[in-house]
Image (spheres, rainbow, N blue to C red):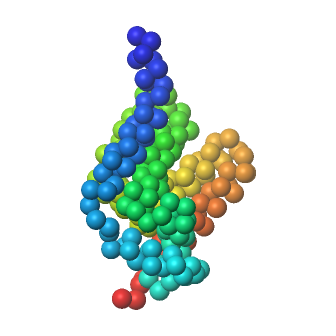
Amino acid sequence: MRWARVLSHHSVILLAGALVAIHLATAARYGIFRDELHYIACAHHLAWGYVDHPPFVVFIARLVCDWLGVSLLALRLLPAIAAGLLVLITARIARELGGGRFAQTLAALAILPVPITLILNHWLTMNAFEPLIWTVMAWAALRAMTIDDGRYWLLAGAMAGIGLENKSFGAHVV
């Protein structure tokens, strides 16, 4: 019985870790995605803006290339971690709303198998970080309101700023 309580207590962390492990285990199974090549090329010429995308993902590509080199595993490490963090933050939102361990685990299980996030967190793209950024922003805003702590509004604002540097909204010229 004791192992069941321990498993229940750590189930969200286990789910997030399993998701990251699955992403990393399959990271090198397919070749490089065309957007990843584009971001690597842009990473050699950092700028605050590009014609076709904002700078955040290019900055991430630059960090990855400088610190880990250019390999499929290196390029896909941070998107995999972002997927795991999305599972954790989703459970934190459930906790913030008053959910116990079961509700947190259920929330983590609900976000885990979503096909679009499974696909998008497999590549280094803007879309790999977008759900995490906006979910952290929502959690920070919720936390600021529930405990009446203005410091969380700063985190919410920072995440909104990063989110806007991650993906453009509005019309694009094609």
- The quadrant holding residue 158 is bottom right
Q: Is residue 110 left or right of residue 168?
A: left
Residue 54 in sight in this render: no
**Which residue is painted at 53% across and 70% down in the image?**
62
Quarter of the rendering containing residue 15: top left
> Residue 104 versus residue 57: which sits nearer the camera?
57
On-image quarter of the C terminus: bottom left
- Residue 160 lies left or right of residue 1; in this view the side is right
Q: Residue at the location (39% across, 56% down)?
A: 73
Does residue 30 appear in the picture of this structure?
yes
Residue located 43% across and 23% down the image: 7
Q: Is residue 144 above or below residue 46?
A: above
Residue 130 screen position, x and y as percent = 46, 62
Question: Can you say whether 35 is above or below 112 in the image?
Answer: below
Closer-to-camera residue (46/139): 46
Q: Position of residue 17 (x, y in %)?
A: 43, 39
Q: List x then y, in percent, for residue 125.
A: 41, 66
Image quadrant where one finds the N terminus: top left
